[in-house]
Amino acid sequence: MINHVTIKVKDFEKEAAFYEAALAPLGYGKGPGFPGVQAFVGGDGSAVWVNTAADGEAVAPIHVAFQAADEDAVKAFHKAGLEHDGTDNGQPGPRPNYGPTYYAAFVHDPEGNNIEAMLA
Protein backbone atom coordinates (compact mmCIF):
# COMPACT_ATOMS: atom_id res chain seq x y z
CA MET A 1 0.00 0.00 0.00
CA ILE A 2 1.25 3.47 -0.84
CA ASN A 3 1.27 5.92 2.06
CA HIS A 4 1.85 9.09 0.04
CA VAL A 5 2.94 10.54 -3.28
CA THR A 6 4.56 13.94 -3.76
CA ILE A 7 4.00 15.92 -6.95
CA LYS A 8 6.42 18.80 -7.52
CA VAL A 9 4.84 21.74 -9.36
CA LYS A 10 5.75 25.19 -10.65
CA ASP A 11 2.34 26.90 -10.29
CA PHE A 12 1.28 25.87 -6.79
CA GLU A 13 -2.05 27.73 -6.64
CA LYS A 14 -3.31 26.37 -9.97
CA GLU A 15 -2.15 22.82 -9.22
CA ALA A 16 -3.59 22.80 -5.69
CA ALA A 17 -6.98 23.90 -7.04
CA PHE A 18 -6.82 21.18 -9.72
CA TYR A 19 -6.03 18.40 -7.24
CA GLU A 20 -8.59 19.57 -4.69
CA ALA A 21 -11.34 19.39 -7.34
CA ALA A 22 -10.20 16.29 -9.24
CA LEU A 23 -9.50 14.16 -6.17
CA ALA A 24 -12.71 15.04 -4.28
CA PRO A 25 -14.84 12.51 -6.25
CA LEU A 26 -12.27 9.86 -5.31
CA GLY A 27 -12.65 10.52 -1.59
CA TYR A 28 -9.69 12.84 -1.01
CA GLY A 29 -9.99 16.07 0.97
CA LYS A 30 -7.61 18.79 2.09
CA GLY A 31 -5.19 17.69 4.76
CA PRO A 32 -2.21 19.43 6.31
CA GLY A 33 -0.80 22.37 4.42
CA PHE A 34 1.56 25.29 4.71
CA PRO A 35 2.93 27.84 2.23
CA GLY A 36 3.74 26.08 -1.03
CA VAL A 37 2.67 22.64 0.22
CA GLN A 38 -0.78 21.02 0.43
CA ALA A 39 -1.77 17.46 1.27
CA PHE A 40 -4.94 15.77 0.02
CA VAL A 41 -5.83 12.79 2.20
CA GLY A 42 -7.93 9.79 1.21
CA GLY A 43 -10.27 7.77 3.41
CA ASP A 44 -7.64 5.03 3.64
CA GLY A 45 -5.08 7.49 5.02
CA SER A 46 -3.06 7.72 1.81
CA ALA A 47 -2.00 11.21 0.80
CA VAL A 48 -1.08 13.21 -2.27
CA TRP A 49 1.25 16.09 -1.47
CA VAL A 50 1.47 19.00 -3.91
CA ASN A 51 4.75 20.85 -3.35
CA THR A 52 6.20 23.92 -5.00
CA ALA A 53 9.43 23.02 -6.81
CA ALA A 54 12.51 24.93 -5.70
CA ASP A 55 13.85 27.56 -8.09
CA GLY A 56 15.69 25.76 -10.87
CA GLU A 57 14.46 22.33 -9.74
CA ALA A 58 13.47 20.14 -12.69
CA VAL A 59 9.83 19.06 -12.75
CA ALA A 60 9.32 15.88 -14.79
CA PRO A 61 5.82 14.69 -15.69
CA ILE A 62 4.57 11.63 -13.82
CA HIS A 63 1.64 9.22 -14.10
CA VAL A 64 -0.48 8.49 -11.02
CA ALA A 65 -3.56 6.24 -11.04
CA PHE A 66 -6.20 6.45 -8.31
CA GLN A 67 -8.66 3.67 -7.52
CA ALA A 68 -12.24 4.91 -7.85
CA ALA A 69 -15.31 3.53 -6.08
CA ASP A 70 -17.43 3.30 -9.23
CA GLU A 71 -17.87 4.57 -12.79
CA ASP A 72 -19.65 7.72 -11.56
CA ALA A 73 -16.57 8.65 -9.52
CA VAL A 74 -14.35 8.16 -12.59
CA LYS A 75 -16.65 10.42 -14.61
CA ALA A 76 -16.78 13.07 -11.83
CA PHE A 77 -12.97 13.01 -11.54
CA HIS A 78 -12.62 13.60 -15.29
CA LYS A 79 -15.19 16.42 -15.32
CA ALA A 80 -13.67 18.17 -12.29
CA GLY A 81 -10.17 17.89 -13.74
CA LEU A 82 -11.24 19.51 -17.01
CA GLU A 83 -13.08 22.27 -15.14
CA HIS A 84 -9.88 23.11 -13.23
CA ASP A 85 -7.45 23.67 -16.10
CA GLY A 86 -6.74 20.02 -16.84
CA THR A 87 -6.78 18.66 -20.39
CA ASP A 88 -8.39 15.47 -21.61
CA ASN A 89 -6.08 12.51 -22.06
CA GLY A 90 -8.78 9.83 -22.29
CA GLN A 91 -12.53 10.05 -21.81
CA PRO A 92 -14.16 7.82 -19.16
CA GLY A 93 -14.74 4.36 -20.55
CA PRO A 94 -13.68 0.73 -20.71
CA ARG A 95 -10.03 -0.08 -21.42
CA PRO A 96 -10.19 -3.75 -22.46
CA ASN A 97 -6.55 -3.66 -23.56
CA TYR A 98 -5.64 -3.05 -19.87
CA GLY A 99 -7.96 -5.79 -18.55
CA PRO A 100 -11.44 -7.21 -19.10
CA THR A 101 -13.06 -5.03 -16.40
CA TYR A 102 -10.73 -1.99 -16.52
CA TYR A 103 -12.63 1.32 -16.65
CA ALA A 104 -10.71 4.60 -16.52
CA ALA A 105 -10.36 8.26 -17.41
CA PHE A 106 -7.18 10.29 -17.85
CA VAL A 107 -6.54 14.01 -17.38
CA HIS A 108 -3.31 15.95 -17.76
CA ASP A 109 -3.03 18.36 -14.85
CA PRO A 110 -2.12 21.98 -15.72
CA GLU A 111 1.60 21.09 -15.82
CA GLY A 112 1.26 17.92 -17.89
CA ASN A 113 1.18 15.14 -15.28
CA ASN A 114 -1.01 12.23 -16.41
CA ILE A 115 -3.58 11.64 -13.67
CA GLU A 116 -5.91 8.63 -13.91
CA ALA A 117 -8.99 7.43 -12.06
CA MET A 118 -9.72 3.74 -12.59
CA LEU A 119 -11.64 0.61 -11.69
CA ALA A 120 -10.23 -2.84 -12.30
Image (tube, rainbow, N blue to C red):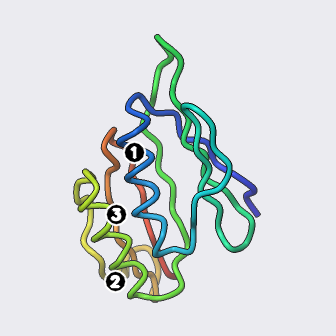
Marks 2 and 1 sit apart, C-alpha to C-alpha, by 21 Å
Specify the label residue 28 is tagged with: none
Relative to 10, 26 lies left or right: right
* Furthest residue toward front: 34
Percent x, y of residue 54 = 53, 18
Q: Secondary structure at mark 1?
A: loop
Which amino acid is tagged 1?
Asn
Number of marks? 3
Percent x, y of residue 93 = 30, 81
Which amino acid is tagged 3?
Phe
Residue 100 vs residue 110, the one in the foreground: 110
Tag 2 or tag 3, which sits nearer the N-term? 2
For marks 3 and 2, give the one nearer the viewer: 3
Relative to 60, 41 lies left or right: right
Name the residue at 40% across, 39% down. Answer: 13
Specify the label residue 94 is tagged with: 2
Q: Secondary structure at mark 2?
A: strand
Label 3, on which residue? 106
